[in-house]
Amino acid sequence: MFKRILVATDLEAQSRRALAIAGALARSFGSSLTVVHVVATPVRLPVWAPPRARKDDAQFGELIRKRVELAQQELDKRVLKSRVAPIAKTRCVVKAGNPLDVIVELADRSDVDLIVIGRGARGRLGPIAERVVRLTGRAVLVAPSKGPAVTGTLLYEDPEALRRARPRRRAA
């Protein structure tokens, strides 16, 4: 059903559930999985900026490159540790830019069938997730921030959540 799945992560706790769900779906369908993290960058300085600002802009570029390297290491480590999907079919991508633009562009370029994204802080639909749902034109699964990781037979990462999700039997 889904041959290519993209999961967007901000490396925060809320996105771990999205990664677990995407991994379970990738295993179930034999899909390839692309895990993307975007290092958000503010607007660059204009060309007409004074020379000191241009020097600061070069330092800013170096800082962003370092943040991308560190994020790539952290993402690789988390994906390996979580064993979300077969490593041969999993690709980790870290880019700098506007998160919405990067996620939509990567989804289009990779021709993904499903985008999995986590909810924002406090379980609300975050602005990036909301815009991805509206603008992408692809199937989007917004992972819940609480409760069982995946209902049904796919995955339970939390035994306590599994116990709560099981239907209670009535005494005869």
Image (cartoon, rainbow, N blue to C red):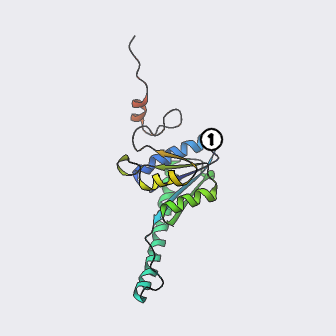
Q: Is residue 82 visible?
A: yes
Residue visible at 44% across and 84% down?
54
Image quadrant holding the N terminus, namely top right
Which of 136/114 is in front? 136
| 15 in relation to 150, above or below | below
Judged from this view, the residue extending furthest toward the top is: 172
In the displayed structure, does residue 122 sit left or right of residue 99? left
Residue 52 at x, y = what percent?
A: 40, 87
Q: Quadrant of residue 162?
A: top left
- The amino acid type found where label 1 is placed reads Phe
Q: Is residue 11 visible?
A: no
Residue visible at 46% across and 65% down?
39
| 19 in relation to 72, above or below | above
Which of 171/144 is in front? 144
Residue 131 at x, y = what percent?
A: 48, 55
Which of 134/4 is in front? 134
Which of 134/72 is in front? 134
Residue 109 at x, y = what percent?
A: 63, 59
Identify the residue under disc 1: 29
